[in-house]
Structures are given as C-alpha cells and as structure tokens.
Image (cartoon, coloured by chain):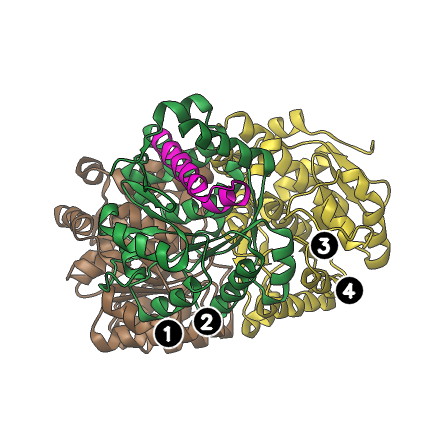
Chain colours: A green, B brown, C yellow
Amino acid sequence: MEKRLWNHVLTVRQQSPLVQNITNFVVMNNSANALLAVGASPIMAHAEGELADMARICQSLVINIGTLDDYWFESMLQASATAQRSGKPWVLDPVGVGATLYRDNAISQLLALQPTVVRGNASEIMALAKANNKATKGVDSTAASDEALDAARFIRYRYGSVVCISGEVDIVVGEGRPIYIRNGDPLMTRVTGLGCSATAIIGAFVAVVEDVVEAVSAAMALLGISGELAAAESAGPGSLQANLLDKLYNITEEEFAMRIRVSHEG
Amino acid sequence: MEKRLWNHVLTVRQQSPLVQNITNFVVMNNSANALLAVGASPIMAHAEGELADMARICQSLVINIGTLDDYWFESMLQASATAQRSGKPWVLDPVGVGATLYRDNAISQLLALQPTVVRGNASEIMALAKANNKATKGVDSTAASDEALDAARFIRYRYGSVVCISGEVDIVVGEGRPIYIRNGDPLMTRVTGLGCSATAIIGAFVAVVEDVVEAVSAAMALLGISGELAAAESAGPGSLQANLLDKLYNITEEEFAMRIRVSHEG
Amino acid sequence: MEKRLWNHVLTVRQQSPLVQNITNFVVMNNSANALLAVGASPIMAHAEGELADMARICQSLVINIGTLDDYWFESMLQASATAQRSGKPWVLDPVGVGATLYRDNAISQLLALQPTVVRGNASEIMALAKANNKATKGVDSTAASDEALDAARFIRYRYGSVVCISGEVDIVVGEGRPIYIRNGDPLMTRVTGLGCSATAIIGAFVAVVEDVVEAVSAAMALLGISGELAAAESAGPGSLQANLLDKLYNITEEEFAMRIRVSHEG
C-alpha cells in the first residue's frame, strides 16, 4: 500500500486539481498554501452568486466550519448540496462541533448531504455521532483516536462517508478494515490550523484518486511525514509552519518511503 | 516582581486557558498562533448564535476592532456584555480609534462595558480618552507612551480598566504606581498585528492570574523579551514573525530573567 | 530608468504612505506585511460607516476581489467611487475574473470607475477585456503575458488605466511603449497571494510617485528582485514567504541594481 500512497502524491502534483474551499478566516492563508505546496490549485470563494459557476470548474469541495456564522453557513449548505447532487467529492471539517449547539445543528444539516469524507479529531468525531455530548475543549482533541472508532463507524454507516479521526494516530474508517497512520509530531498541535490543512489536502487527493480510503490515507501520511521532517529542523511552531510548507513541496519518494508507518493494526 | 512574572508565564503553560477571540481578519492566524505558542488554547468564534455557549466554556475574552463592521460589532457588544455580567475577564484592543468617528462610537459603547484591560498604543489611548482627537496615522503610534499617561489614568478612573500603553516602553496603569516595561525591538513594528498578539496574550494571562496588573506586565514582558531574542536572529520582519512564535514557545526562565527590564521608574 | 526606479523605492520608505486595502481574507495578513516591509503603512478597513473618514487620511486605495461577496462589493464600489471623485490613485486586482459571471459583473462596475492601475495575470487581463471568455484555471495564469497585450491596450484606451500584466515577464502598459520586467522566480507561484502583494505594493508606489508607469514598474521590479534573492535561499514556498518579506525590507541599492532587468524590448 505504501507505494500506492506515494503514487497518489505524484498524481496530485501532476493533475493539480482545482479545490474550492469554504473555510474559516483563521486558516484561509495556510490552507491555500498547503494546497499549493502539494501541487494543487486552491480557490477560496463563498459568494452565493458564484457558487454554481465555481462548482462547474472545481474538482472537489472543502467545507470547514471554524468561524461559522449564518451567512457563511448558507453558502456551505448550497455548495455541498450541489456537490452531492453532481457526485463531486466533498470533504467536511466539523471544527469545534460539540462545543456549541449552534455548531451541532449546522453540522447535522451538512452531514445529511453525505460528505465523501469527514475529518476531525476524536472529540469532534464523537460529538458528531452524539456518542459524546460533552463540550470539546476548544478545537483541540481531548480524547485518543481509537476512542472514536465506534463513532466513526456510525457516521460511515449512516452517511456513507469515509471518516478520518486525526490525532497522535490517524485512523481512516471506510470500506474494509480501518487504516492506522502513525506519522506526525506533537509540535504540530502548536500551529493553528494544521488539522484544517489536513482537510484541505484531503480535498486535493479525493479530487484525483478514485479510492477514497487510499486518497485520505495518502493525504494524512503526506502531512504527517512532512510534519515529522519539518519538526526535526524547527526550533518551535513558527519555523515549523514554514518548514512544513517547504517539505510538503519538496518531499521525495525516499523520504516518504523511509518514514511512512501505515497499517491495519490498531 | 520579575520572579512572579515568570511564574505567571508558567501558570499559563500549565493551565492552558481557553481564550475566545472576536478579532480582525488580518491577525486571526497570528493571534491564534501566539496563544498556542504561550501554551493557551485559542477559540476564534463570533456567531451570535453560539456566543452564550462559547462564554460558558472560555475563561476570558479578547475583543479587537481592527476590521470592524456593523455585523461583527454586534457580536463584540453581546460577548463583552456577557463577560461583564458574569465577571469574566475581557480585554479590549481599540485598533485605529481616533482615525474615524465610526471607531470612536463603537469603542465608546465597548468601554462602557468596563473591559478588564485596555491595550493600545499611545495615540489610541489618547484618542480613547478624548485627550487627543487628531486622526491617528493608521494603526501605528505617533506619540510616545508617556504622553498617554494622563489618558490612561482617566480610563482607569472612569471605567476601572487596567490600561496598557504599548510602544518603545510599555506602561501598565492600574492599582498603585504605573509599571514600565522596557523590552522589545523596533523591528517588531514592521510585522503586522504584533500589538494584536500582545492583546491576545494578555487575554491568556488575565484568564489565570488574579492580579491584573501583574498579568498584563507578564504578558508584555514575555512578548517584548521574546521579540528581542527573535529579532537578534532575524534578517527582517518575515523571519521575525516565525522566530517570535518559536521563542514564545521555548523561552526559558534564564532568558526571561536575564532580559527583563521592568520597574516603577518613568 | 533603473536608477529612477530605485529612487522610487527610497521615496516609499521615506514617505511611508498610508494605503487603504479592501482586499480578500486569504491575503490580508500578507498584504499588510508586504506593505510594512517596503516601508508603507497599511490600513485594512471596509465598513461603509468609515469609508469617508478613511479616504480622508489614506493616500491611495487597493481593491482586490479575491473573496468577493455582495457585502464587500458595496464597500469596494463606494471606496473606489470616492477615490475616483477626489483624484486619489487607486489600484484594482481582478482576482479570478473570467471564472464566474459574478466576478465579471463586479469587475465591470469597478472598471467603470477608472482605476489608476489594473494588475492581473494574463488570463485575468484577457478576461477583463472580453478578449477571452474562457474560465480561468483558478487564480493562476494559464496564458503568457504577451498574449494579453492587446487586452491591456484596450483597457488602457477605454478606462485610462495603466495595466500591469504579471507573470514570468511583467508588462506595464501605459503612456509610451510597454515596459517589460524580467525578474522573479517560479517558486513565487507556489506561495498564495504574491500577486495580491504585488497589487498592494503598487498601491504604495502610486501614492507617492507621480509617474504611474514608473511607480508600477518600480513596485514590480522590487517584488521580482526580492523574490529572486529570497528564492535563492529558500527550501520551498514556506521559507520563501518569510525570506521575501525580509528582502523587501532590507534590499540594498546594489542588490537592486545588479539584478534589475527592465526594458522596452518585448
């Protein structure tokens, strides 16, 4: 599988998919840069008046509710409904779900539109599945990834989505046995929005890779490995942010192959 | 006092307070990263529909009017009124006050809700107190910090806020004699939003440190010293931005103790 | 001409013009930092209630439609109409024009207000002039700069704007023969919003340099040369972003003079 995942990295670089993002104000710049670094073409556009035109030219859609409000939610709903109707892959990042009723309600409506992929930390995935109604602590995960496995399976069963639980271990739940990815570095949690970057990168991979579980796994492995390599030469979160973009851009097959830790073992 | 200020830095790292920010589009990413670097947990959320829930889980609130408009102002008003009612610490950054009547009006309403701390440059603090009605030059300060002392005392007297005048020298005006902090580097003025980062970091410190004057002083000293150390190894404002986050994250007691210049001398 | 262009760089540093930006969420931070790095003072403000006051204190205006919506468009229209009426220089960045009808309509209304400068990539300039109605591929250029020369001349003729076609070669079309600038580095296309930074920097130069063609040429040469120098010491787009701001800030006359490639040769 490792070799196929690397090939997916190359596919994104070669096909440079156009990914529409309706995301939060905090991470727009980072998400765009992450997409450019992996070889994709980001579009950040949310006006209702151009959603239909954007849907026509983009190959996938990323929805992220980080700085949600009523106005943006309308755009998110319309864009994801269009994606669902046309069978275009779309990815949902339920930032902070479980923290407020407002987010829970918004996410329920978005989930009903059957996202191709849902990516969140364990707390968010559990909140999504109502397996856990406790307020999450901000946007950080306070639970371990495997605690959210049942919740992920529930979302998979109910909405048909591939679910990615990200954390110290990333778990991808879809067809077949879950895939566990053990890459990344703890310093990555001290940079804002790297979870959102993960979601954006997943958006690029599902645009060009047919097997959704593999697309998600390749995206998470790429980010995790790049993060490890970047952290090794970073004095803190500021330099990590820059080094991570560098590494997403210039990572080689050898670096990828030497580092990747992916398996079906929980 | 120096030792106590360092202990406050440690308290933030240990307690990792959840800080809600309703701030401007320019600095959202930086403010979130600054909060993460000092060990706090940032939340950027502004929708009216979730303000009450957010208030319940956050330990402090930061309001920053940088890219103010009517819609965001409503959220700011509601969130700060809730903070005032519940006795939760909240910090106000009056970006650009004095430049437009629109900002002056908005700030008057926010001030009436008695922020725990107000942080601005000398021009802004003077504009706040109507001691100075001249247009500020953008968001840069054109006056020296001590010129704003009377204005700060007026705000302190009228609204009960601790006032932080930031600039080449930072002055904290509250109970007792003002505290002067002489740290920082001129290159910091060439990075956008470091004043806003200061305000955000103050938000983290007042969330967990009872003595507000000390909380503000610790936050300003931490940022100033980290800025000095970061500037020493930066070729310009771009690398300073990254190095500053690194240093906020990894600063040691020794570095802090060797550099801190805090006193009651004007 | 090279010497005069360098003198314009110095003029911006000395006069530090106040530049108002109504721009997109993705690049607000970068544009502000680019303006600070070249010595200008950025203001990011868009509320209708303060546009008139802002117009009074700013020396130029930058309008960028990257994350356009109806609400922001109203502000853009009002601000640029005010600039036109008062003869204040203003710069238009038609991000993504040609991709959606929504953008095409918005841009038509803005163009009618006769921007002092229009800067876009070749696809955007051609879309502007209706010489090309094909959807652009996101915000990247898929056409070479010289293919857009006729379109630029048309905009020049119709609206009186100086037109800057940016790309591998930048072409400035105004009075007299076009100016070609052959600086920059391909890695710059992998950092989001450097085109927007170009537009913002142009805004600083037209605020203080009377000859618009020279102002634009100086801005583009400064960014291109700084980009080359920064790219030479960058491992990828993340470090390029930081190094570019450093270089915009500390570039010397010698570096500028040794690198600049400007001519009337197509």
Q: Quadrant of residue A125?
A: bottom left
Residue A70: numbered disc: 2
Q: Specify start and end residues of the magenta stretch as a single range.
A: A202-229
Q: Is there a contact, CB below 8 Å, between mark 1 and mark 3?
A: no
Disc number lying in front (4 or 2): 2
Q: Is there a contact, CB below 8 Å, between mark 1 and mark 4?
A: no
| Residues marked 2 and 3, same chain | no
B10, B100: nearer the viewer:
B10
Q: Position of residue C129 (x, y in %)?
A: 80, 54
The residue that label 4 is drawn on is C112
Helix, strand or loop status at disc 2: helix
Left or right: where A95 falls relative to C41: left
Disc number lying in front (4 or 3): 3
Left or right: where A14 falls relative to A117: right
The residue that label 3 is drawn on is C98
- Chain for numbered disc 3: C
